[in-house]
Image (cartoon, rainbow, N blue to C red):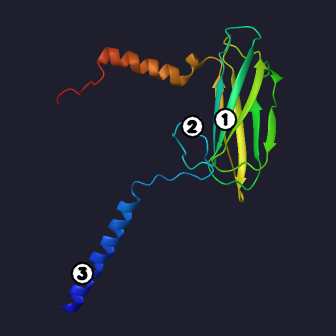
Amino acid sequence: MRYRTALTLFVALIFGITGWAYVSNKDKKREPASVKSKFWMPVPVGKHLALLKVEVAPTEIPESGNSDVNLVGRILVNQEMTSDLSYVWALPEDVQVVEGQLSDSLANVKMGQIVEVRLTVSGFNKEKQRMISLQASGARGEEKMGSSAVVVSRPEDTWESVASEMKKAADEQLGPESKPVGR
């Protein structure tokens, strides 16, 4: 009987300590110490533990001609890296660099740091569908990892845009919440 009572008290003590630790740490918000600026953070979608997150934002894309288009690429380093951060822009044949570097390697990029790279191009317009991508890579130990982002000249022609239009048309025809017959 004493053994059973001692065991019950011991299990209750363990649950009590665990519950107290959970409640006392529940409201603490943890962030990397190296994060200083909250100006830009990528949308928290996808591989949240990825080494790098990449995003590209263009200025307005002209309808035609060879007007300059400014591209801003942002690379967020989510984990400590053991190598330099490398990036490369991939351009279509008929798009030319006006200002900026197509590729570079940056040393001493820390976890939580956002690297902004800029490129100005001409020949990127809405006459036909073109893509420009920014690819970033780095290593953590023996693992080499990378990420990329794409900007298109005609976003209205992408599958993402067409799919949302199809859903809107279906909702108009069927109603937003169509129910199966017989229920």
Label of residue 42 in the image: 2
**Distance (Cα) linking label 1 and label 3:** 56 Å
Label of residue 8 in the image: 3
Q: Residue furthest front?
A: 36
Above/below status of 12 relative to 143: below
| Residue 83 vs residue 135, the one in the foreground | 83
Judged from the image, the secondary structure of the residue bearing numbered disc 1 is strand
Horizontal and vertical percent position of residue 169: 39, 15
* Mark 3 burial class by Cα count in 10 Å: few <14, some 14-19, many 20+: few
Above/below status of 68 relative to 140: above
Residue appearing at x 77%, y 49% in the figure? 84
* Mark 2 burial class by Cα count in 10 Å: few <14, some 14-19, many 20+: few
Examine the rendering and report whether any part of residue 92 can be seen: no
**Distance (Cα) linking label 2 and label 3:** 49 Å
Q: Quadrant of the C terminus?
A: top left
Label 2–label 3 contact, CB within 8 A: no
| Residue 98 vs residue 173, the one in the foreground | 98
Judged from the image, the secondary structure of the residue bearing numbered disc 2 is loop
Identity, as a three-letter code, of the amino acid under mark 1: Arg
Residue appearing at x 59%, y 35% in the figure? 39
Label 1–label 2 contact, CB within 8 A: yes
Above/below status of 177 relative to 52: above
Q: Earlier in the sequence, mark 2 or mark 3?
A: 3
Identity, as a three-letter code, of the amino acid under mark 2: Pro
Label of residue 178 in the image: none
Which residue was labeled with disc 1?
Answer: 74
Horizontal and vertical percent position of residue 10: 29, 81
Horizontal and vertical percent position of residue 56: 65, 30
Left or right, residue 67 beside residue 9: right
Q: How many marks?
A: 3
Q: Quadrant of the N terminus?
A: bottom left
Horizontal and vertical percent position of residue 45: 51, 39
